[in-house]
Image (cartoon, rainbow, N blue to C red):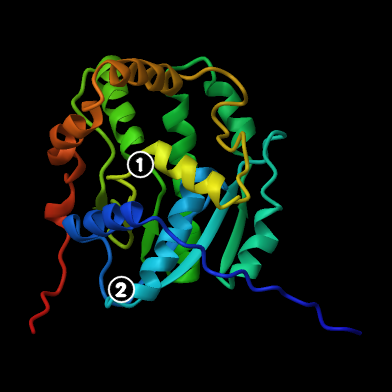
Amino acid sequence: MKAEMVTTLPRLPVPKLLQRRIGRAVADFRMIQPGDRILLGLSGGKDSLTLLHLLRAMQRQSPVPFELGVATVDPMSPDYDPQPLVPYLRALGIPYFLERQNIYERAQKHLLRPSYCSFCARMRRGVLYRCARREGYQVLALGQHLDDFAESFFMSMFYNGELRTMKAHYRVREGDLRVIRPLVYCRERQTRQFASEQALPVIHENCPACFGKPTERQHMKELLATQEAYDPRLFKQLQRALLPLMGQGLESLEFEETHD
């Protein structure tokens, strides 16, 4: 029997602007510590695929050593097929875990509620937490960018009456895992451009909450796009305003201080 031939994909060139922004976010929020084992939650969308290649580039260049693994949650939706990711990750030579969970069926009960997007997101994170613990990773990296942070802020304010957004870096309630979002300073248009230019194997319809239906997040995205067309400085100002909310949770993190 012939051994299976595995083609190793070359490392992709990463735009310097994206490298600078992710490097600044990692430093500002102290996301990566020496010896970290990081599990990237890879949906197959443009954002998580871009983050995958940014972390690979950082792993090669950073003086802080860390390991990288990848996990995909398959919500068992008829609109989502993660199988093309399997040979792609194999060719990259990165540990890969495909986790199947019937989120689709459970989410159907929440489709008429304003919170069903967050419901599905919480379920996906729960699956990723279990995978990280099982495989010995203590850090989970997620692919939300600045646009996501801004949309979450306005959704929280409009629908829940709270001044909140996602956190850039925090420890989960159980205390054994940290969650980081290294794209916090990056724009969605940047990940879209990188994915297009590098012909990344983007899987569309990857959110189990949507199922082709309009969502509150999409409405918020359109609202912000309209405002940005009027004022191109919008997201620069939003980033400054949201920094205190993004950094919530850092005060509960303890790291060993290193000295030269």
Q: Is residue 225 left or right of residue 232?
A: right
Regarding mark 2 in the picture, which secondary structure is present there?
Answer: loop
Image point 57% across, 22% down: which residue?
109
Q: Where is residue 258 in the image (x, y as percent from the top left)?
A: 12, 78
- Kindly identify the amino acid type of the residue bearing the numbered disc 2: Ser
- Kindly identify the amino acid type of the residue bearing the numbered disc 1: His
* Image quarter of residue 141: bottom left
Q: Residue furthest right?
A: 1
Quarter of the image containing the N terminus? Answer: bottom right
Image point 40% across, 63% down: which residue?
55
* Image quarter of residue 157: top left
Looking at the image, which is closer to me, 227 or 96? 227
* Image quarter of residue 238: top left
Q: Name the residue under label 1.
A: 145
Q: Position of residue 62 (x, y in %)?
A: 30, 73
- Cβ atoms under marks 1 and 2 closer than 8 Å: no
